[in-house]
Image: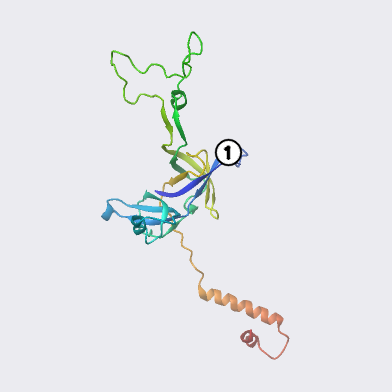
Amino acid sequence: MKGIIGKKIGMTQTFSEKGEVQPVTLVQAGPCVITQIKTQSNDGYNAIQIGYETLKKANKPTSGHLQRTGNFKYLREIRVEELDELQVGQLLNVQMFSVGEIIRVTANSKGRGFAGGMKRHGFHGGPKTHGQSDRWRAPGSVGAGSTPGRVFKGKRMAGHYGNETITTKGLEVVSVDTENNILSIKGAVPGARDTLVMVAGDGNIPIYIEEPEPINEVVEEVVEEVVEEAAEEAEPTNETVEEVVEEA
């Protein structure tokens, strides 16, 4: 499994290739840093811990745990299958995801405080006529009086609504902005704006290593350019092209 931490920016809309309007959610995903690697031999399972957003001040336990990578405000753990090429301090960004990939997003839903049965569970409510008074939004009966003589556990009633960890599955990646680390996800994502989200997908974390150009090839290209410029600018004399290059 692969994943990255981010924050929900908000929602907008785009047009598909067929010209259809599709709602999308923008997520500022990463960059994240691998802060810890857990192995099967030491911890009983393979996983990595990633950090997101730099923390200015941290307590001593946190500073000691993150002394190799620096302090981070948010830490999350991801189960992985292979740990061969992963190492502490490695940077993770949105390049691990591709357009059309199916992902899942985990976040805390919007908190709605204390809500009644109609809003919290979608109850129908009581009749608005036939002698009823102030029972339009009442939940109705919650159980018999004599048998069983109690209210069963788990009975759907009024109470705290929202602010729960929710995972939305089957979301599609519409676009990947590698310069700004922004993911465009088709559909809605749990939470309000600036909510911390965890974007996860199937597969291994890809390793991106920028290979430098061979030094010999670069030197040869520079020499050829200098020779051409010197040959064009030099006046016809007895000097050879190589002497002009040496003077340049």
In the depicted view, which residue is nearer to us: 76 or 169? 76
- Residue 122 placed where, x, y %? 46, 24
Residue at the outermost top position: 130
Residue wearing tag 1: 22
The image quarter containing residue 89 is bottom left
The residue that appears at 38% across and 56% down in the rendered structure is: 35
> Residue 61 appears at what percent x and percent y?
33, 55
Q: Amino acid at mark 1?
A: Gln
Taking 56 as reference, is 160 above or below it?
Answer: above
Q: How many marks?
A: 1
- Quarter of the image with the C terminus in it: bottom right
For the point 42% across and 56% down, the residue is 57
Residue reaching furthest to the bottom: 238
Relative horizontal placement of residue 179, taking residue 108 as reference (left or right): right
Whether residue 90 is situated above or below residue 189 in the rendered picture: below
- The x and y percentages for residue 141 are 38, 16
Q: How is the image coloured?
A: rainbow
Q: Secondary structure at mark 1?
A: strand
Image-quadrant location for residue 59: bottom left
Say whether residue 142 is left or right of residue 194. Answer: left
Q: Is residue 204 above or below residue 170?
A: below
Q: Judge left or right: residue 243 versus residue 167.
A: right
User: How many neighbours does mark 1 have within 10 angstroms: few (below 14), some (14-19), or many (20 or more)?
Assistant: few
Q: Residue at x 67, y 90 (%)?
A: 239
Q: Is residue 205 above or below residue 116?
A: below
Quick one: 46 or 123, which is closer to the camera? 123
User: In the image, what residue occupies the spot 47% across and 26% down?
Assistant: 119
Q: Nearer the viewer, residue 112 or 13?
A: 112
